[in-house]
Structures are given as structure tokens and as C-alpha cells.
Amino acid sequence: MSQQNAIEVQKVSKRFGSYQALHSVSFNIRSNEFFTMLGPSGCGKTTLLRMIAGFETPDTGQILLNQRDIVDIPPHKRHVNTVFQSYALFPHMTLEQNVAFGLENLGWDKARRQARVGEMLERVHMSAFANRKPAQLSGGQRQRVALARALAPEPEVLLLDEPLSALDLKLRQAMRDELRALQRDTGITFVFVTHDQEEALDMSDRIAVLGSGEVQQLGTPTEIYEEPVNRFVADFVGETNFLEVQVLESASGRATIRTPFDQVIQVPSPVNMPAGPATLSVRPEKINLGDQAPQSAFDAKVVNKNYMGGYTHYLLSAGGVEFRASRRNASRDGDTISLGSTVSVGFHENAARLLAS
Ligand SMILES: Nc1ncnc2c1ncn2[C@@H]1O[C@H](COP(=O)(O)OP(=O)(O)OP(=O)(O)O)[C@@H](O)[C@H]1O
């Protein structure tokens, strides 16, 4: 993957009336990557996408597209296309005409247009429907055509605004793989907006987690999930337990802490973590139970359990604290820990993460 930047967002702020939607946001999107802006409703992700597209302007700051400032370039001159949740296909046109539409405006001649439309419909597996109208298609098929139309003029960047959210669950999952493959095949930079953390983890090369109009963390899916920098990211991406701990000392990315279960352990930590109270994030699947618990284990009571087939989720209590653990049922009789029993519990030190805030 090239490390060149397709898009640079530099200190972008935006206010709507008295509401500050973006607070001096900066990040770079690399050429040819699948980049996701992930965050809860209202965090500013759509506003950022609309700024890149040119439908919205920053109050302050700059946006560069391939090193060029685009703030004053109108949307249709940006070599950026957008796919929306609502497809936005022209209902009176056939699929072929829909995909050809933008190419005609760009001045492509008929032969070139036809070749490109054929190629794009093929790519999204819609060649057999070329002469149908959008109303004769399912939601997933419409979204494939919308993708073909947006990719046909070979934009430098494709913006995707929650494009899967109108589809049902099964189709959404299948479309994730298709989108990812389409990005790899075309090599076009994809900028994807979603509030669905699973989608983001599944598809992205890198994710920017947005919250309260700021970038809370930017990293690969593994970094975001395994090394969340703060409570917001740990909570928004995946499930986790927050344990109130005491930092005894810290140095170069590791800290010695006392847990609510009276263990003194060393865990990964942000640099310069001051001594005193802090929060430790431990994901439920990283808490091991019974014979799987490590040596530093302690006893906990099973307060509740939910058998989910492949997994069982447990609510446990120890040291006056309740926390969650989940365990994969790896065999027919994997679910052996009963409600009300006392079980040995532990987690590997590298599986926990001390949070900066
Ligand atoms: N044109 C506008 N006028 C006033 N407020 C706006 C406008 N556009 C966005 N906002 C506000 O700015 C904030 C960020 O909006 P934005 O649409 O970027 O959020 P989002 O993260 O995409 O959320 P969602 O997933 O709900 O679309 C929201 O609180 C929204 O109400």
C-alpha cells in the first residue's frame, strides 16, 4: 500500500449556530486505503464526509486532495464521488443509463461509455439486469448499481455514507465482502462512514473513531480494539469491563497496578501514567474461567449466565465488583460452569489495557 496521502484534513472546525460540530480535527487518509470514520450519531462524521465531497465548507482549516487545497473547488470538479444510504438512482432510467449518466457529462464518447458501463455492471454482478429500472431491483441490487455508477468515472476517492444501513442483516454482511473486494480490485481510496463498529473492524485498513467532534483514536482495527486509548473508544468499539484500579508506578508503556481483586500486576499502559486511581479495560472474552484461568487467578461468583450456543456470557462478582466474561463452547459439553457456583477467574496481563482518560 502506498503511504502517500489521498486526503489531508488539517485543523478543520465547524459550527452550526451555537453548536460546535467539529473541533480542530486533523488526520490523513492514505492513497488506496479503505478508511473508515466510525462514531455515534452526531459525532460529526457525515459533516466531515460532506466537506470532502464539497457540500459543506469548514469554518477554519484546510482539506487537501492529493496535496491540493480543495476548499474552493466545487463538488463536481473534485474527482470524488459519493454513495449514499438511499441509493439516489434515477427511477426513470435503466441501470445502464444510470451508470452511463455521469460519463456523458464528463464528455466520454459513446464507445468508451458503453465499454465502461459494461465493465462496471459486470464488476458488481448486475450485467443480466442492464435494461431494468431501479424499481425492479432489490435493495442490495440497487446499492450495487449505485456503486457501479459512482465508480464508473474512475474517481480518485469514493465516499460511502452508511451505504449498507438500509439492507437487511444477511445482505449487509455479504455486501461487506463485496465492498472490500471492490476497493482492492479498483485500488480507489474508499472513505466509509458508519456507526456500526463491526462493519468498521471487518472492512477497514484504518479507522478514525470520532466522538464529540474530535478524533478520539486513529489506527488499524486491531489497534483500535486491542489498544483503545480512552474510555470512549474502549466502550464504543466492542464490549468491555471497566475496573477501577490503583496505579502504583509506571514506566515506558507498562504500569504496576492493584486491581479490585487485590492482585498486583503489570499491564500495558499509556506513557507517563501518574500514580493514583485509574481505569483498566478488560474485554469479556479475555477473562478466562475455570481450568482456563491463568496462575494469577482469583475466585468469583457466577451471578448470571446467558447460554448463546457458540458462546456463554457470564456475569461474575468478586471483591464487591461485577464484571462480564464470555467463553466459547468449544465442545458439546463446553458449558460446564453453573449459575451460583464459585469459579476461578483470571486474565493475562497483556490482555488488559490501562486507559489515559
Ligand atoms: N446543517 C446543519 N445545521 C445545524 N446542525 C447541523 C447541521 N448539520 C449537522 N448538524 C449537527 O452537527 C452535528 C454533527 O452532525 P453529523 O451529521 O456530522 O453527525 P453524524 O456523526 O454523521 O451523525 P449521524 O450518524 O446521526 O448522521 C449533529 O449534532 C448535527 O445535529
Image: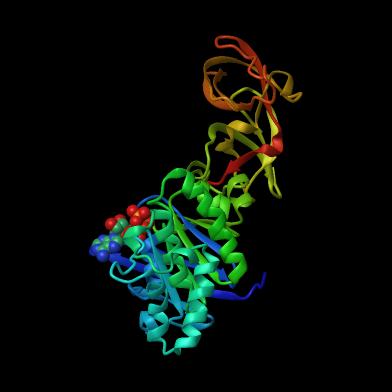
The percent coordinates of residue 339 (x first, y second) are 55, 11
Specify the quadrant that holds the N terminus.
bottom right
Q: Answer with the quarter of the image where residue 129 lies.
A: bottom left
Depth order, front residue of 335/93? 93
Depth order, front residue of 320/135? 135
Q: Answer with the quarter of the image where residue 49 lies.
A: bottom left
Please, is residue 275 above or below residue 211 in the view? above
Instruction: Give the residue at x 57% y 59%.
Output: 180
Tell whether 129 sits left or right of 203.
Answer: left
Colour mode?
rainbow
Please, is residue 44 above or below residue 148 in the view? above
Tell whether 50 sits left or right of 322.
Answer: left
Depth order, front residue of 75/256? 75
The percent coordinates of residue 6 (x first, y second) are 55, 75
The percent coordinates of residue 218 (x first, y second) are 55, 58
The percent coordinates of residue 353 (x first, y second) are 62, 41
Q: Classify the position of ligand 1 by quadrant: top left, top right, bottom left or bottom right.
A: bottom left
Residue 77 visible from this viewpoint: no
Tell whether 187 sits left or right of 117.
Answer: right
Residue furthest left in the image: 17
Instruction: Give the residue at x 47% y 49%.
Output: 172
Q: Answer with the quarter of the image where residue 107 lies.
A: bottom left
